[in-house]
Amino acid sequence: MGRERLYLFDTTLRDGAQTNGVDFTLNDKLAIARMLDELGIDYIEAGYPGANPTDTQLFAEERGLRATFTAFGMTRRPGRSTSNDPGLAALLEAKADAICFVAKSWDYHVRVALETSAEENLASIRDSVRAAVGKKREVLLDCEHFFDGYKADARFALACAKAAYDEGARWVVLCDTNGGALPHEVEKIVGEVVKVIPGSHVGIHAHNDTEQAVANSLAAVRAGARQIQGTLNGLGERCGNANLVSIIPTLKLKGEFAGRFEIGVSDAQLKTLAHASRTLDEMLNRAPNRHAAYVGESAFATKAGIHASAIMKEPATYEHVPPETVGNQRKLLVSDQAGKSNVLAELERIGLKVDREDPRIGRLLEVVKEREAIGYAYEAADASFELLARRVLGKVPNYFDVEKFDVTVEQRDNALGQRVTVSLAVVKVKVDGEHLISAAEGNGPVNALDLALRKDLGKYQSYISGLELTDYRVRILNGGTEAVTRVLIESQDETGERWTTVGVSPNIIDASFQALMDSIVYKLVRSGA
Ligand SMILES: [Zn+2]
């Protein structure tokens, strides 16, 4: 029996761009659109042509995408004709494959927000859809607040949806705009809508205000909807939109959906999902969510010794899907609870071949336990663990020595008479018998130290030129004046690879220095310096 086609509609560039602190440039938008296209998404909603220069320009570009490139905008304004509405005109003129209109479907909003009549709202939907169909565009109608509207006045909400469908809209999209609906409500209401409009023309657009956006999307599909709208990583204002990064693998890997439906994402494309998710975070300069379903760094990480030894024998014992299917990987955490099997598995993952019976394994485990007891956290700092393991196994060259460093913090008045705090670091290193001294100013002591340390490493400098510090986290481990500080540093190189290193000391500068050193040495090891 053939499987039914389900369509994926991404709105990262439109609804996702509403997120606090997110501001995509034209290049960002083009890069994300290409990434979505390569992932196999059917529709890419890219913005509002005519509403701002970036989006207007975006829709004027040659894009060469396979996906249906979709422009978003409002239906004609009440009391205007379609030919006398500049917003609508810009939308109709845009170089888009499809146009997604948004319209009210809650009588309360029509009265209060739009200050118009129910009849005029319906006429605006009909006129706008007709105009876009006339321009040979595929047309979608987002029914804003559909579920609240349906609960308040089902006949009116349905009439809005039906008006668009009858005028030739390819899709009528039911939006849970304030994200307050629950899965059983969505399933029931969508079930009623598909009695009036065929499910093959019905979409779902869910927001995540009750953490149900993914569940609501799946509930709508169960009830008959055949288009799912969402964003990468669940980006979106407030609590976000339905997360396509969770929805896609669920549709591909979970029997109920995989058996009934086909989507545009192939198995090979699914393997690039984790990478796509992390690439978006990188563009937004955000640390990826470790605990994200399917793609998070911890999504397939196991800590307890007994689970780990079972996973070594048969991964399916503790994993709901194989991590490789979504481009993620299994990770057995090294921690003070860990047994030898964790350490062995982790060594294998990082590509260090060691015999099971090698006495150095036992020694490594001892060192890890000792260091974790004084505050090191290797499960969060994979790069520091790898270095520690390589050191115990005698596989880290001594690239350079830091003979001394000096950091000063000075507060003074600058030339404009403003009070400023300046940090200066001086670092003396020895590379191949050669003494090098670097100094750098920074906005804080750690920043200055980082800059000075990476300024001149002699013949190794070219290996670390793309190194960048992307996250810095400090934790005080026990209170009082005897407190110990743990610093975790996340770094990234020019290829986009990220790694985390750790340092522990009663002195925050010293703890930071250890983590910075590990980061540099790790990069040198990885680059084969
Ligand atoms: Zn929305």
Image: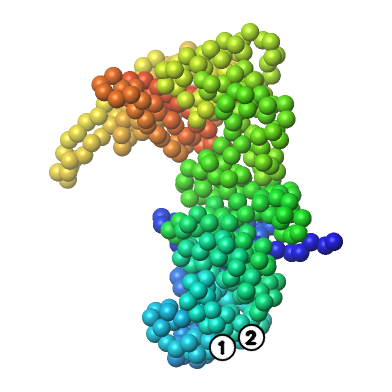
- Circle nearer the N terminus (2, 1): 1
In the picture, the quarter occupied by the C terminus is top right
For this orientation, the residue located farthest to the left is 417
Could you say which is closer to the camera, residue 319 or residue 233?
319
Q: Secondary structure at mark 1?
A: helix
Q: Quadrant of residue 443?
A: top left
- Looking at the rendered structure, which numbered label has been put on residue 404? none
| Residue 435 pos. (x, y %) | 42, 16
Q: Residues within 10 Å of mark 2 (few under 14, many from 20)?
A: some
Pick the quarter of the image with the N terminus. Answer: bottom right
Looking at the picture, how far across and down is residue 379, in whole percent?
52, 28
- Residue at label 1? 127
**Image location of residue 213, percent across then percent down:** 54, 58
- Please state which amino acid type lies under the numbered disc 1: Asp
Q: Is mark 1 within 8 Å of ligand 1?
A: no
Residue at the outermost right position: 1
Tell me the amino acid under the disc marked 2: Glu
